[in-house]
Amino acid sequence: MRKLMKTGAIAAVAAASLVGSVAPAMATSTVVENTVLVWNSTSIGPENTTTLTAKCPSTSPYPVKIAVSSSTKDSYNSQYLGYKNLTVDGRAVKVTYTNSQSKLDRYATSQSVKVEVLCSNIPQEPPTSVELKESTSMAPGGEALVIVTCPPSQPRVTGHEERHPAGVSIVDSGQEGSSYWVRYQNDDFLHAAWSDLYLTCSA
């Protein structure tokens, strides 16, 4: 009887030891996600092409979400901004874009682009979509035609959204292949206005 009790005590101690060793392992297996937003921007003149790179830090090396934006004072120039390619190469996100406007155009101007990447410390598949944003301003009583085109690497338009203040109306909008466009009218003849067009592009 004593022997059985002793064996049972040993089993109980062993079980306690097992539980004691498992609990800390379970506690340390939980990983808290840390996200970091990195960005880069540049500007190029007419008849030029450049590649813009934003790189996630080593502490959060996995790209989660990509957003690319551009802004122009004259919507006429938005038609000349073209995204040629967008790739994810490890920690680096590279966007190649061009300004196809002729240097001889009397309205020729530089095109500025900003790329933002949300990075995580948790391993995951690279994003297969990108959000493009084109912003423009309108003179009092003026209008704007904003055009955004997906890059060949993410050619499908899978979503769009536009924002504008009160006093601005949408005259027309539509999609043609990988491009989406909106024509705005500023109904306020005393104040300037703005508009933002967002386009989600997927591979």
Image (tube, rainbow, N blue to C red):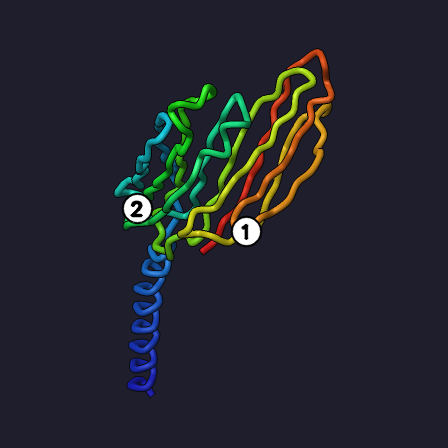
Q: Which residue extends farthest left?
A: 58
Residue in front for this viewpoint, 48 or 85: 48
In the displayed structure, 104 sits above or below 201; it is: above
In the displayed structure, 24 sits above or below 120; it is: below
| Residue 23 position in % (x across, y down) | 36, 61
Quarter of the figure with residue 82: top left
Q: Residue at x 31, y 71 (%)?
A: 13
User: Badge 2 is on which residue?
Assistant: 61
Tell me whether the residue at label 2 lies in contact with that at label 1, contact meaning CB atoms closer than 8 angstroms. no
Judge from the rendering whether residue 145 lies leftward or rightward of residue 25; answer left or right: right
Judge from the rendering whether residue 201 lies leftward or rightward of residue 121; answer left or right: right
| Residue 19 position in % (x across, y down) | 35, 67
The dot on residue 177 is 1
| Residue 34 position in % (x across, y down) | 38, 43
Quarter of the figure with residue 27: bottom left
Screen quadrant of the N terminus: bottom left
Quarter of the figure with residue 7: bottom left
Classed neighbour count for the residue bearing mark 1: other residues with Cα under 10 Å, few (<14), some (14–19), many (≥20): few
Q: Amino acid at mark 1?
A: Gly
